[in-house]
Amino acid sequence: MKLKRVSAIVGIAAFVPAMAFGQAVVAPIPDVKTGGSANMHALGHVPQGGFGFAADVEMEQDMNRPYVYTPGFTGKFFQIISIADPSNPKVLYRWTLENSDLTQGLGALDGKYFKIKGRYYYAQSLQNGQGGPNATLGIVVFDVTGLPNAALVKEIARVYIPESPGGVHNIFAYKHSNGRSLLVATAVAPHAIVYDLDKIVAGAPKETWKVAEVPVPQQTTGPAGGMGGGYHDFYVAYDVGTHQDKFYGAGAGGYYVFDITKPETPTLLYSIAGAAGATSGHTFTPTPDGKFAVTESEYQYAPLRIFDLRPALEGKTQNIRNPISAWTADWQDLSHNHEVRWPYVFVSAYEDGLQVFNMIDPKHPKTVGWYYTCECEHETGFGNDPNNGWRGTSVDNGAFGIDIRNADGLIVISDMNTGLWTFRMDGFKGWSGADWNVPNISSVQDWDNGPVPQTKGVAPKV
């Protein structure tokens, strides 16, 4: 099948003409995109079992713990991979859910590591179907302190959600400014659930694990971008400017920001709803200062939209409707998850593999690096083709998850078609907010100290 690749700028401009756009990346090979930019270097690669066997990816941040976790859709499992030598990743451990062949649903999608009292843990989400075994199982927690000795990996807890069968899609582990370790999870319900990780690992009674529910505001609820009309994904971060712990949720109707400084009583601050072409939210990631955000709405041709959050922060509005710009790798495809390391945004862009753009000027994002990992033809992703199993005719194929190690700038990608990849980008040798005069806030948590001590630096004026 031959693909016609045209300019992404021209194609998207016709789609949303009011936006400003970054550079396009147009593959020179018509059938399968291969290779990458001169500044992006593929180091290592581990296949994970074929199409559909890789979902998200999580990388530990301590340099003396070189471990990557890769969940899998098909098979309901996760692997622990050593990247002690990033050019030669090695599988150390594999866990598979019992009765996985009978368990319906997407399986193991997202995982997060965390640290409490000197011990390291990994939480694995499971989005099992409402029929069959394990329908109410949402999260399994493991003690992984003993790595690299795989024999010391130990399951310590299971989180069930009997009131909402269907499991958990995404999770986010967060070190709260009050010192608590929290885990936020999706549910097949119009809310997210906040759990107390300290109590889970301490073996406290299960009825004490749940801290709160963060609702989807009913007045703005629209098409179900999340599970059960709730949330799909979220990000939690400390806002240095307002001295608040904030929940950034993407789901039904759009995007919502809650104050969870007091986790038991989440308070809605403002929303992004009613934006053209974004009737539901998929992913919502703010910049370290909380003043801008990169968002995804999951459908083919959708760009990543960038919003200016300052009007809401300044009390001028409680709902933001219009993005200030957008970025895409190829207008015919879809960019997926992303990690913000100001001013860079690292994207797992499905068919377009690893993509990196610079948003130091949020109104004019610019592509600065890429590498194609999918090794796939266009529109051969997840679907309902009875003759093709999981495969269909969508663009949901290729790079699914991405993570960055702040200490040295190592990049990892999980690709649904080809497995785990490790990369380095020229000039990116690690990330600290102080290097960019912004708060040292990212998805990476300081599990020993929490976010409050990391408040040096202010964002540059834009």
Image (spheres, helix red, strand yellow):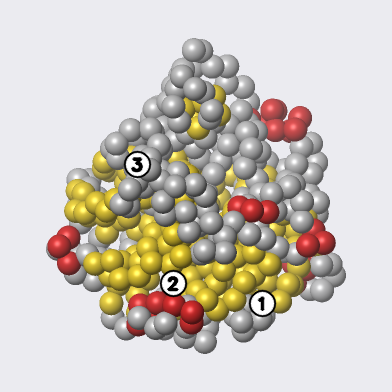
Q: Are marks 2 and 1 in contact (CB under 8 Å)?
A: no
- Residue that numbered label 2 is attached to: 445
Mark before the other along the chain sequence, 2 or 3? 3
**Which residue is depicted at the point 42% across and 54% down?**
134
Q: Nearer the viewer, residue 104 or 149?
A: 104
Secondary element at tag 2: loop
Q: Position of residue 87 (x, y in %)?
A: 22, 45
Relative placement, left or right, of 67 versus 2 is left
Relative placement, left or right, of 403 versus 89 is right
Mark before the other along the chain sequence, 2 or 1? 1
**Which residue is depicted at the point 81% across and 67% down?**
318
Secondary element at tag 1: loop
Q: Is residue 157 above or below residue 179?
A: above
Indicate which disc residue 266 carries: 1
Q: CA distance from mark 2 to mark 1?
A: 21 Å
- Residue that numbered label 3 is attached to: 101
Type of the residue with mark 2: Gln
Q: Is residue 451 above or below residue 373?
A: below
**Which residue is depicted at the point 62% across and 78% down?**
260
Type of the residue with mark 1: Pro
Which numbered mark, 2 or 3, is in the foreground of this view? 3
